[in-house]
């Protein structure tokens, strides 16, 4: 995943927005029931997740705080959990659950300390929280989640990116950063 993030590190915001538009169109197709090639592929989902994380990392303040380094053990647990899930080893779900909760708690601490809180910050928190909670419910296999619930984080992502674009609509330099 680090190699994917290095590839994205020099991309300008205008290219990120182009890929977000492609993601939005593919989500509309999926909502309509039109299955696209590679839509459920693990590598494609990992690529899109890395892309979104890099966009928020580039345009946010979370990675520049001291709290961010506390994520590293949880990120390594998440990678270990994904590998355990792929190889069908035991405790993969437990590793993922602990890592997701740890990352969420650290992000909530960061958000509570942040002043002032903009609308975009609240939308990012809502997106991140829904994304992790839906993944945790899916990992627990205790509750049946309707398929439409998986699109809630996608919709929140679209609203968050739209808010970021709206906030920077007069800042032409932002597109070239």
Image (spheres, rainbow, N blue to C red):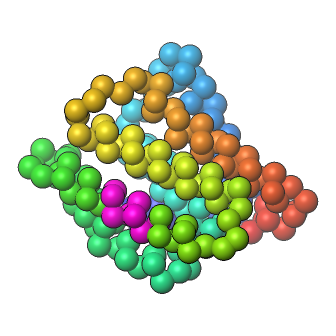
Near-viewer residue (26 or 150): 150
- Side of 12 relative to 112 (left or right): right
Q: Residue at x 63, y 68 (%)?
A: 60
Q: Residue extending furthest front?
A: 112
Classify 113 as above or below 136: below
Say whether residue 106 is magenta: yes
Tell me where the magenta segment starts and ends, as one range.
100-107
Quadrant into which the C terminus falls = bottom right
Q: Residue at x 86, y 55 (%)?
A: 169
Residue 171 coordinates in the image, percent (x, y): 87, 64
Say whether residue 102 is magenta: yes
Q: Is residue 17 visible?
A: no
Q: Residue extending furthest right?
A: 170
Q: Residue at x 71, y 62 (%)?
A: 118
Dividing the picture into quarters, in which one does residue 98 lie?
bottom left
Q: Is residue 27 visible?
A: yes
Dividing the picture into quarters, in which one does residue 175 lie?
bottom right
Dividing the picture into quarters, in which one does residue 174 lie?
bottom right
Q: Residue at x 40, y 49 (%)?
A: 132
Quadrant into which the N terminus falls = bottom left
Residue 55 coordinates in the image, percent (x, y): 60, 60
Dominant secondary structure, magenta: helix
- Side of 89 relative to 160 (left or right): left
Near-viewer residue (145 or 35): 145
């Amino acid at each position: 995943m680090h190699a994917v993030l290095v590839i994205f590190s020099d991309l300008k915001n205008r290219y990120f927005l182009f890929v977000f538009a492609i993601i939005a169109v593919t989500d509309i197709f999926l909502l309509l029931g039109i299955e696209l090639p590679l839509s459920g592929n693990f590598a494609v989902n990992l690529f899109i997740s890395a892309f979104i994380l890099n966009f928020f990392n580039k345009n946010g303040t979370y990675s520049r705080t001291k709290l961010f380094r506390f994520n590293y053990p949880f990120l390594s647990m998440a990678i270990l959990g994904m590998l355990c899930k792929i190889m069908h080893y035991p405790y993969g779900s437990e590793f993922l659950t602990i890592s997701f909760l740890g990352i969420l708690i650290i992000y909530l601490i960061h958000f509570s300390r942040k002043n002032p809180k903009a609308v975009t910050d609240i939308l990012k928190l809502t997106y991140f929280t829904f994304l992790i909670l839906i993944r945790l419910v899916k990992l627990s296999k205790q509750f049946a989640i309707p398929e439409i619930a998986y699109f809630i984080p996608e919709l929140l992502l679209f609203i968050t990116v739209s808010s970021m674009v709206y906030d920077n609509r007069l800042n032409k330099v932002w597109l070239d950063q």
